Image (cartoon, rainbow, N blue to C red):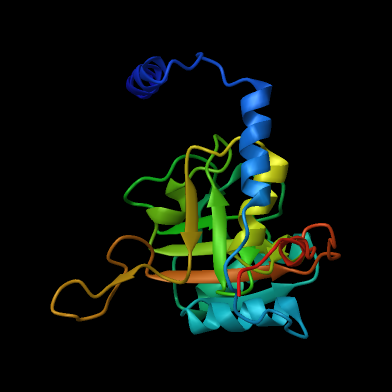
Amino acid sequence: MAARENILSRIRANQKKPGVTSQADLAQAANFIASRPQGPRPRSDWPDLIAHFKEQAVQMASTVDEVAFRAEIPAAVSRYLLQLDLPLNGIGWPEFSDLDWKSAGVAMEYRSAIGADKLGVTGCYCAIAETGTLLLTSSRSTPNATSLIPDTHIAIVKTSRIVVGMEEAWNLMRAELKQPPRACSFISGPSRTADIEQTLVIGAHGPYRVHIIVLDEPHDDLINNDWWKNKKTSD
């Protein structure tokens, strides 16, 4: 972090900017973003936003399950692991430490991921229906490594956090987080690359498997608002 601050302080000094961003500068930046017209967007008036997200996630080679209650998450994780004959142990974000994993036969730890870990269980900041994409934001309690290092990534997605498109995801972050996190991860299915001789390789830079458990919660109309429709769009 010292190196980062050193670089940023040199940029500020060059631009004759103060060390701390003023409220006026923040307001100016927010107004600039809000006033910019959006470009054309694909059709997004799907009859069922959640169903469309699940459909798109499957198109991206994720697998999808659904539970009605949070307490059902450990059993859903266990069911998935048993189907694929995978080890019943892994690491997870602390937000799931209160669940009864023991009764589901799954041994969970809540720590940073290491190379030997085979399963990572995370939540997600929000999910994007248009592309079946998960958005994860980094913090002390939501480490990126949990979704990147293990061979299998299981993500819990609340239906109340499924938004229409990328624009809504960024707008939600600006409204809720105010300042961007250190890192944002957009995950659309398992890691893959075709850089070498155009041969598709799964798991090259991350998990071989991405499994999504959709937690059916009451939908929040404030999240899936028509904010983007109220902005000017170019023809």
Q: Nearer the viewer, residue 173 or 72?
A: 173
Snapshot quadrant of residue 215: bottom right
Residue 147 vertical placement versus 9 (above, below): below
Residue 214 vertical placement versus 45 (above, below): above
The residue lying at 42 percent from left, 45 percent from top is: 113
Residue 31 vertical placement versus 46 (above, below): above
Snapshot quadrant of residue 124: bottom right
Whether residue 20 can be seen here: yes
The residue lying at 52 percent from left, 42 percent from top is: 138
Whether residue 105 can be seen here: no
Residue reaching furthest to the front: 235
Question: What is the total number of numbered labels drawn onto the structure image?
Answer: 0
Q: Is residue 5 left or right of residue 225?
A: left
**From the image, which quarter does the N terminus lie in?**
top left
**From the image, which quarter does the C terminus lie in?**
bottom right
Q: Is residue 228 left or right of residue 9?
A: right
Q: Position of residue 32 (x, y in %)?
A: 62, 43
The residue lying at 57 percent from left, 73 percent from top is: 132
Q: Position of residue 66 (x, y in %)?
A: 70, 75
Q: Position of residue 35 (x, y in %)?
A: 67, 50
The residue lying at 41 percent from left, 21 percent from top is: 15
Q: Position of residue 73 (x, y in %)?
A: 69, 64
